Image (cartoon, helix red, strand yellow):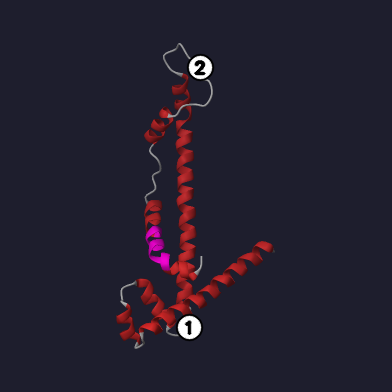
Amino acid sequence: MRAEMMFKEYKNMKRELSVLEFQLRRFEGIDEEEVLEAMCFTHPVGDERIQTSSISDKTAKIALSYKHVAERENDDWHDFLLKRYKSLYEEITFFEHSVLELEGVLSEVIIDLLKGELTWETMMKKYNVSHAMIGKYRKAAIKELDARYELRDKQTEAYILS
């Protein structure tokens, strides 16, 4: 992900990371009753036998397999949440580290822009610069951050190809 996209999506990504962290901390999985209901209302593919006994073939199959299905669904859901969390955490951490490493006043300006607590007019007063200069700082930071992303990509490529 490039710097420009990170600027646009940073707050949303932080929000999603917080929700994922909440879900992982309180993970209980899918309720077994929900699995049973889903299995009861699905129809098997192919011919269904007609039984003369009081328990249908479908009910027997559900009874034998619902715990296995519930465990598999829970494992898949937890794995998905964990994988997404790790990916998002890595991307945000790299971006934040790169912003902190920016040269001179760029780091402070970009942090203020990302927080979104200050208006551009307030930032103009804080840094004693013009509106255009704040924009130039942003463009310079994006250029420097993109160089860091390229370096990371090259390192990943070198590892994969070695």
> In what element is the residue under mark 2?
loop
Residue found farthest to the front: 132
Residue depicted at x 36% and y 76% = 112
Q: 91 or 30, which lies in front?
A: 91
- The chief SS type of the magenta part is helix
Residue depicted at x 42% and y 67% = 8
Residue 21, quarter of picture = bottom left
Where's residue 66, x and y in %? 45, 31
For the C terminus, give its image quadrant: bottom right
Which residue is label 2 attached to? 49
Amino acid tagged 2: Arg
Q: Is residue 34 above or below residue 92?
A: above
Q: Earlier in the sequence, mark 1 or mark 2?
A: 2
Q: Residues within 10 Å of mark 2 (few under 14, many from 20)?
A: few
Q: 73 or 141, which lies in front?
A: 141
Amino acid tagged 1: Glu
89 to the left or right of 31:
right
Where's residue 96, x and y in %? 45, 71
Q: Is residue 38 above or below residue 79?
A: above
Is residue 100 a member of the stretch shown in magenta?
no
Residue 113, quarter of picture = bottom left
Where's residue 85, x and y in %? 45, 57
Q: Residues within 10 Å of mark 1 (few under 14, many from 20)?
A: few
Q: Which mark is residue 103?
A: 1
Q: CA distance from mark 1 to mark 2?
A: 73 Å
Q: Is residue 19 above or below residue 65?
A: below
Q: Magenta stretch: give its range.
A: 8-17
